[in-house]
Image: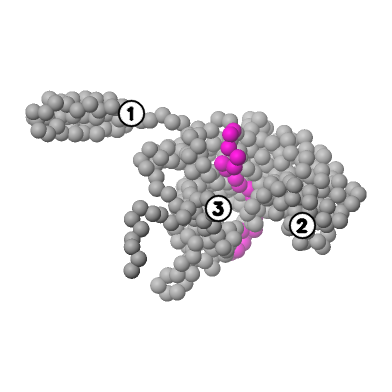
Amino acid sequence: MSKPKGFEKPTGVKDYVPEAVERLRRIEFRVLDCMKRWGYQQIITPTLEFYDTVGTASATTDRKLFKLLDQNGRTLVLRSDMTAPIARVVSSLLKEEPLPLRLSYHSSVFRAFAEEAGKESEFFQTGVELVGDASAEADAEVVALAIASLEAAGITEFKLAIGHIGFLNGLLEELLPWRNEEQEWLKESLINRDYVGYRRILSEIGLTGRSAEKLEGLLALHGEGGGLEVARGLTRNAEAQKAVDHLRNVLEVLDAYGVSDRVLVDLTMVGDFSYYTGMTFEGYASGLGFPVVSGGRYDNLLSQFGRPAPATGFAIKTNRIMEWGAAASEQAERTTILYRAAKRREALAQAAELRAAGNGVVVTRLVPDGEGLPTVAGNRLMTFE
């Protein structure tokens, strides 16, 4: 029998000490309160789901799912995102509820990574799903709420880039018809932000002339919104033109929200979730090289659960915000009350009064009574002798 691993943990998981938990919960509570004020109701789903339902509907690739068998031999998975479980609930427990539905969540999710990747296998997400509204107003609402949520989490310097999968699909279909493999190669390069690889693929597939220029020009379609007119001129494809019109409408609504300064257009952004069908977006905080929020429209997912409905939403990467200290760092005041046995009643009454007012209180009896009072650093100190 192997020796127990007393202090080791599985790859990709971590412990959270009290200070880290306090930061995490502070972000969680502030963001969920923000979402509640926008009319979103919190939902909790199981950590374990059936592979044949939520597992296969998830956008997470099969090799990144944690799988296990129950006592009846059925394959289960640890949830790898919250969108598919919420789609299941909307199509079952909430199937009689009128649309649109506005739901929020804060949960841990699980994805398996190779040991050398250095990524976390368990992490926290806080997000929303807006189900039953296909309009540009709905997409703009979730983008504006993502901005408000990041501000509630304590992030002050950030930008959201928005794109539309329909534009890229339409452009590639027009310029590379029937060449699905080459289209996927180009999309994969864009997902990975590998522009060098993107240009190499363009040269290898043998495109020349205006078609090559248009696909090369795609890489320049990002900025404060002016790229939309250039994008319209790159293609006559109906799907791509519709995507440009939709993004223009989203930007108009975001301007009415007063958050246009937080948003830029990036039509090279594909999104790494296979169920995205329309607008996608990512948010980047100053000084960080990875997104702290991502989301988009996924109009086909709910049909897999028997309740076809359009939907859009986002997830904040709560761990990333916490670990980089983006949340406000103030500490709640904590009082330490030291008392002698003869003053126990008075000390405990004072502790109850302070706790009722929202303060943290630690109460300690001094034993033996003849010893002096200890020094308590960093706290408000009260003594009852």
Element type at mark 3: helix
- Rendered location of residue 164, percent (x, y): 71, 47
Of the two numbered discs 2 and 3 in the rendering, the one whose residue sits closer to the viewer: 3
What residue did someone put label 3 on?
117
Question: Residue 220, how many percent across, how many down?
Answer: 78, 40
In the picture, which quadrant includes the C terminus? top left
In the image, what residue type sits under mark 3?
Answer: Ala
383 relative position to 203: left or right? left
Magenta span contains residue 9: no
Q: Which residue is mark 2?
A: 183
Disc nearer the start of the sequence (2/1): 2
Judging depth in this view, the residue of 89 and 74 nearest the camera is 74
Q: Which residues are magenta?
A: 286-308
How much space separates mark 2 and mark 3, taking CA atoms?
Answer: 27 Å
* Residue type at the position of mark 2: Gln
**Residue beneath the point at 81% across and 38% down:** 229
- Could you classify mark 2 by the number of other residues whose Cα lies within 10 Å: few (under 14), some (14-19), or many (20 or more)? some
Residue that sits furthest to the right in the current view: 209
Q: Which mark is residue 333?
A: 1
